Amino acid sequence: MIAAPTIADKISEQITGRLGSAVVPQATVDRIPTFWVSKDRAPALLRFLKEGIDQPYKMLYDLSAIDERMRVHRDGQPSIDFTVVYHLLSFDRNEYVRIKVALAEGRLSLPSITSIWPAADWYEREVFDMFGIVFDGHPHLERLLMPKTWVGHPLRKEHPSRATEMGPYRLPPDKEVAEQEALRFHPEEWGMSRERDGSDFIFLNVGPQHPGTHGVLRIALQLDGEEVVDAIPQIGFHHRGAEKMGERQSWHSYIPYTDRIDYLGGVMNNLAYLTAVETLAGIRVPPRAQVIRVMLAELFRIISHLVWYGTFAQDLGQMSPVFFTFNDRERAFGIVEAITGARMHPAWFRIGGVAADLPRGWENLFRDFIEYLPPRLKEYDLTVMRNRIFQARTKGIGGLTVNEAIEWGMTGPNLRACGFDWDFRKRQPYSGYDQFQFDIPTAQSGDCYDRAVVRVEEMRQSLRIIEQCMDNMPEGPYKSDHPLATPPVKDRTMHDIETLITHFVNVSWGPVMPVGEALGAIEGTKGNNGYYLISDGSTVSYRTRIRTPSFAHIQTLRWLSRGLMIPDVVVNLGSLDFVLADIDR
Amino acid sequence: MKWSLTRPEVTGLVATPDAEAFEQTVRRSVVLSRLEDLVYVEMATSITSKFDLSRFGSEVIRGTPREADLMVVAGTVFTKMAPIVQRLYEQMMEPRWVISMGSCANSGGMYDIYSVVQGVDKFLPVDVYVPGCPPRPEAFLEGLLLLRNVVGTEQRPLSWVVGSQETVRAPMPSLRDLMRPSRQKATVLREPDEV
């Protein structure tokens, strides 16, 4: 992730060579080249970065906004009210670029970039929903996460954060009717016709409460007989305001909230968040803590993939695998529980390390698991992957090419299934992943079967990594002695007053992160999970932006489902491996 | 299904033969409807091998509330979702029960945030609250068993013209108070430093 200064200079030269003084660079802690540009020139610059430049930035990694009105430390940035932030990713350069557009409060509009990246669709709708910023030329700009009846834009600073500030919740019958009416799907709004060649389309509402959608996801299907003409996923039924929560929880006490983003990924989420926090703070995590983190993160990758394995087979009508894989998951949870004391959401990583050292006898737990799982995986190969019905239902369904996947912002196993061996653990190593030997499984066609192939192999690779962690666990501290490590190492607090004061303040108020902004991104269980944090020099984050893989993946559903049958939509959903909290946050 | 006119305070939680038969009937027919999802993962775990919900006769999960006796609100209730939860509840046939599973459904939990309803009991009657974030599968099983006991001793009106039209429910004392003596007996706690 850390771009060498020379590369940053190179892109800087290329951009200023193209647009002259119209772009203003900004220095950031994470050393991602950052440029300010006026809103009129932004689309041209973005198109240039995607198509005109050598080694182009092909992926729209993230698009979000910042309410700057309460910000104290501007550090030479323009004094404006709102900022729209684009993050692009270049695979050829292996680096990000950040483009910022300043907006004044009275004129909150800028040109849409949906014509450059179709994936910008949902991102722009989210920014509109959360900030009220209008994107001119967007095909269908309406609220994405909040209900249509909502008043206000939640991520603006003047919007209440707490539900208890907004009065008790009431649901009288007339309100229920009005809310239900607001949820009604109107095909005309989406430019859909109600008939073709004299025969009517059927509009089928799937979800938000449906066994096939793995949670509260709603899909409006336009059907010609049993064929899906169009599918509109609708989200926001699981929006927990995690980004707003970051603006009031201390840097330390936000960790449990990250667990619940990709709720099958457990401590993997902590790692993504802490990567960003530790970049801001400049903390070097000791080797033992790094290896403990990697070991548990990989265990959670296996746990997450096991849930996906069983439920995916169940989506296809196989009843037994889910019982097998959940049983294996229980064994893995046995280890998680012995080490962290919790099952799904341990929140066990800390700023600068982990919460505690490993308990005595931890090796045996892992040793048993590493011996136990491979034969089971072999068995599942026979029962699931080689099952003829399973293959017939998944092969050739929902396939896409590498370029299409990149265009839609796909990462993780779904991208690798297309044949592109891009793994952030290898390409942008964090937490010492460059010290481990493992392969990046890929497949070719990117269809539902190939996505499964990649995930199954990933579990074996994760076992390899865990084994290396066990064999080479370094000695030493499990937490950094950096002053911002939280809670601080306590051994000297009773010896000198300075340490005691630091300890007291860090525990009671929480640490104060240095002013700056940083993106921390990791290879999560489902794809790239990134935290873009802005510190205004206080005990809480000024803006927490969470880039989640499932958001990008589910956006492709509309495009993947066209021309398929209804059961294939369920297969597509299962193979994409998403969780709702990871979409809606 | 047999109905009896004995009052709960007469029978207490000790099942009479009639109540036993009733309980047996209900025990077999508590069909679940599930809602929401985060906590549902742990609820699903309670159905799988290690925990095996079917031991208690409630492994049948219906996608539609019209066929269900019990709705488990397993996860956070959002303002966008609340009208839908309400609609699903209205679709359930009487008699119906609700388990609120997890801190978020109980009270909003750690999410005192604009998009979250601070507890499903703001608009639905809840019979059993299962604490935890997420609750362990065992906790859910215990909640289900508690509800089963209550259902087995509940008195409903004999008909719409005879007697009181109220449903008389056996008292549900706080589990914390009931369990305190046994919990206080634990004086030696295992050290976390050892597996």
Image (cartoon, coloured by chain):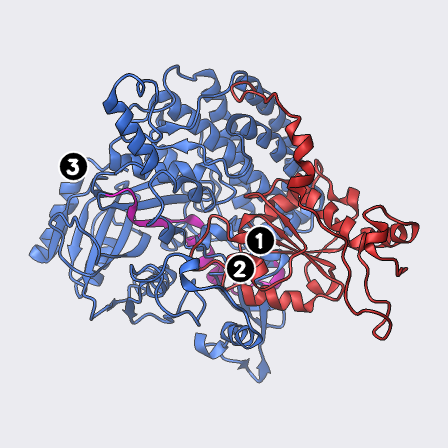
Look at discs 2 and 3 and give the one toward the viewer.
2
Q: What element carries label 2?
A: loop
Mark 2 lies on residue:
A217
The image quarter containing residue A584 is: bottom left
What residue type is disc 2 on?
Answer: Leu
Chain red in the figure, letter: B
Q: Is mark 3 on a helix, strand or loop?
A: helix
Chain blue in the figure, letter: A
Horizontally, is A70 left or right of A464 in the view?
Answer: left
Mark 1 lies on residue:
A214
Mark 3 lies on residue:
A5
Q: Does the magenta stretch include residue A390?
A: no
What residue type is disc 3 on?
Answer: Pro
The residue lying toward the viewer, choosing from A211 and A149, is: A149
* Contact between labelled residues 1 and 2, with CB atoms less than 8 Å apart: yes
Q: How crowded is mark 2: few (under 14 residues within 10 Å), some or many (20 or more)?
A: many
In this picture, is B156 found above or below A531? below
